[in-house]
């Protein structure tokens, strides 16, 4: 009876953490909305890059596949949150393609087809692995690597904040939602005894805490002395086109809110 009660409590905690993670992740997924409102209003993608949304789509579909019953058991929250994220990225990519110049349009379409091709190879390759444990570990490592690279992207923002002593390009609510999402799925992974979930989200939690600490430390300096010209910061981002969705969203939200 004691064991059964503990199992039920653990299951409830896991479900609660999963729901909390889904809600906080939604904030991250809608963060590029101001950017696309500007794109639609101006009917141009200007100098924005479509790469972050392509990369985010790949990350979402890989993680969604990891959470599916064919790969791991009882990880529905992982599948739902990443499926929703994939839908958001597809919408962003379609809008980007509509308003992009011809050369950029062709480039993004090519990258989108490449992502879909890569995912097809991953799905087919994993289904060819008969041993379910081996399949789970293989896709687990792949999804963890993808998630770590996405959650580690704020290192660029952290470096920018320290150099400029300004949090102009690190919006507080985006950092907070990243912390809440990473912490929620850290707990979700712990409650489900899944290292492929709690390990990368543990890294994300630490990085998010660093962002919040830096925001608290530098927020007064940002009010008194905004030292980064918008043009310079925009050029820096163009020089880092490979940055993923979260970093790009953070920088663009900060840039738009300051303009």
Image (tube, helix red, strand yellow):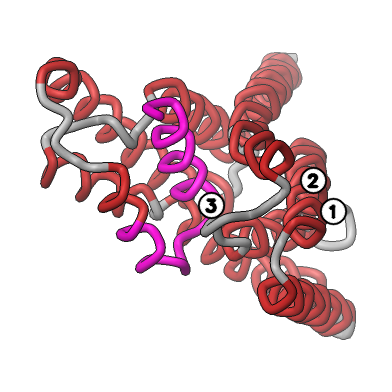
Image quadrant of residue 222? top left
Query: In the shown orientation, is residue 145 left or right of residue 142?
Result: left
* Majority SS type along the magenta span: helix
Residue 3 visible from this viewpoint? no
- Name the spot of residue 183 as percent of width and height, x first: 48, 30
Q: Which residue is mark 3?
A: 195
- Name the spot of residue 246 as percent of width and height, x first: 50, 46
Q: Which residue is mark 2?
A: 79
Q: Are marks 2 and 1 in contact (CB under 8 Å)?
A: yes
- Residue segment shown in magenta: 235-259
Q: Which residue is mark 1?
A: 68
Q: Is residue 114 magenta?
A: no
Numbered tag placed on residue 11 in the rendering: none
Image quadrant of residue 26? top right
Residue at image x 33%, y 60%?
A: 235
Determine whether 250 is above or below 126 in the image.
above
Query: In the shown orientation, is residue 179 left or right of residue 207?
Result: right
Q: Quadrant of the C terminus?
A: top left
Label 2 – label 1 distance at C-alpha: 6 Å
Label 3 – label 1 distance at C-alpha: 16 Å
Q: Earlier in the sequence, mark 3 or mark 1?
A: 1
Residue at image x 81%, y 58%?
A: 98
Residue at image x 70%, y 36%?
A: 41
Q: Are marks 2 and 3 in contact (CB under 8 Å)?
A: no
Label 2 – label 3 distance at C-alpha: 16 Å
Query: In the shown orientation, is residue 230 left or right of residue 218?
Result: right
Q: Earlier in the sequence, mark 2 or mark 3?
A: 2
Which residue is outermost to the front? 42
């Amino acid at each position: 009876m004691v064991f059964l009660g503990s199992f039920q409590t653990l299951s409830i905690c896991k479900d609660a953490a999963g729901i909390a993670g889904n809600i906080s992740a939604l904030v991250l997924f809608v963060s590029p909305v101001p950017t696309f409102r500007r794109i639609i209003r101006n009917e141009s993608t200007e100098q924005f890059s479509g790469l972050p949304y392509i990369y985010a789509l790949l990350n979402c579909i890989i993680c969604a596949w990891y959470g599916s019953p064919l790969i791991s058991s009882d990880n529905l929250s992982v599948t739902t949150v990443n499926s929703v994220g994939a839908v958001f990225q597809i919408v962003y990519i379609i809008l980007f393609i509509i308003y992009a110049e011809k050369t950029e349009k062709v480039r993004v379409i090519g990258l989108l087809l490449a992502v879909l091709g890569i995912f097809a190879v991953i799905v087919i390759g994993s289904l060819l692995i008969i041993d379910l444990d081996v399949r789970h570990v293989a896709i687990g490592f792949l999804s963890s690597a993808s998630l770590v690279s996405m959650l580690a992207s704020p290192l660029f923002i952290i470096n920018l904040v320290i150099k400029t002593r300004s949090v102009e390009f690190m919006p507080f609510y985006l950092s907070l939602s990243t912390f809440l999402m990473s912490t929620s799925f850290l707990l979700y992974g712990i409650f489900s005894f899944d290292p492929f979930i709690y390990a990368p989200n543990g890294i994300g939690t630490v990085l998010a805490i660093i962002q919040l600490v830096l925001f608290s430390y530098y927020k007064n300096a940002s009010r008194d002395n905004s030292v980064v010209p918008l043009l310079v910061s925009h050029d820096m981002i163009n020089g880092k086109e490979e940055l993923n969705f979260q970093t790009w969203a953070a920088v663009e939200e900060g840039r738009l809110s300051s303009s």
